Amino acid sequence: MKKLGLFLLLTVLSAALLTGCASNADTLASPTPGATGQQNAMGAGGEPSPNASTAPAATDSAQQGGIMTVEDAVKASEAMEDAIDKLTEVEDAEVAVIGDTALVGVRFTSQYQGKVDDRLKKMVLARVQTVDKTVKRVAVTDDDTLVKAISDLEDTLAKAPSLDDVTDELKKLADKITVYTE
């Protein structure tokens, strides 16, 4: 009788201890590399999808309806670079944004063997829109010459007295890159 009571006591105690070890972590499956179609709550490469807790805060211009000043464009470009840099595929990003169009130049990590495709463009657009929801078009490239041109445009933008001074240059660059829209 004592053995049965001791056994029941140990069983209840073990169950209580194991219950405390249960994890309440998210149990979402990692996406298959190269998978297409709808993304689940996890982005490609196991990177969490952008949301309010991990993405940079939206700029004031997003709430006012667009990027209207040079200062807004410079702040948004820098915030978008930071957001895109968080993608596991991207080592470094250069961004120049005016109006509803963002030019994005990326340098991939050595582990990433892919190229710029619609899946990557969609992820970049999602990251860009965490900063400014009015941006509806992204032109993404990994061509070194164009990435350098985007970086130079960003520097020109920071020194420009108005957006009109760099808008034509942005449009010329955008014509050389396939623009992705949602």
Image (cartoon, rainbow, N blue to C red):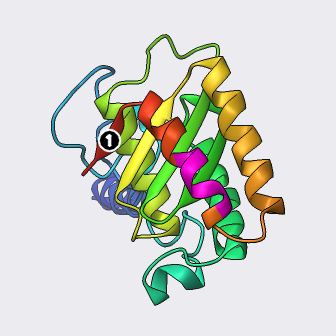
Q: Main secondary structure of the magenta part?
A: helix
* Element at label 1: strand
Q: Which region is colored magenta?
A: 165-170
Q: Residue at x 36, y 31 (%)?
A: 178
**Three-letter code, disc 1:** Tyr
Quadrant of the image for the N terminus? bottom left
Q: Quadrant of residue 150?
A: top right
- Note whether residue 162 is visible: yes
53 to the left or right of 74: left
Query: Does residue 130 sit above or below 112 in this rendering?
Result: below
**Mark 1 neighbour class, 10 Å CA radius: few under 14, some 14 to 19, many 20 or more:** some
Q: Residue at x 34, y 25 (%)?
A: 117
Q: Residue at x 39, y 43 (%)?
A: 123
Question: In the depicted view, which residue is nearer to us: 104 or 122?
Answer: 104
Q: Position of residue 121 (x, y in %)?
A: 38, 37
- Note whether residue 108 is visible: no
Residue 45 drawn in magenta: no
Furthest residue to the right? 159
Q: Position of residue 93 (x, y in %)?
A: 65, 38
Residue under circle 1? 180
Q: Position of residue 101 (x, y in %)?
A: 44, 55
Q: Quadrant of residue 122?
A: top left
Q: Quadrant of residue 43?
A: top left
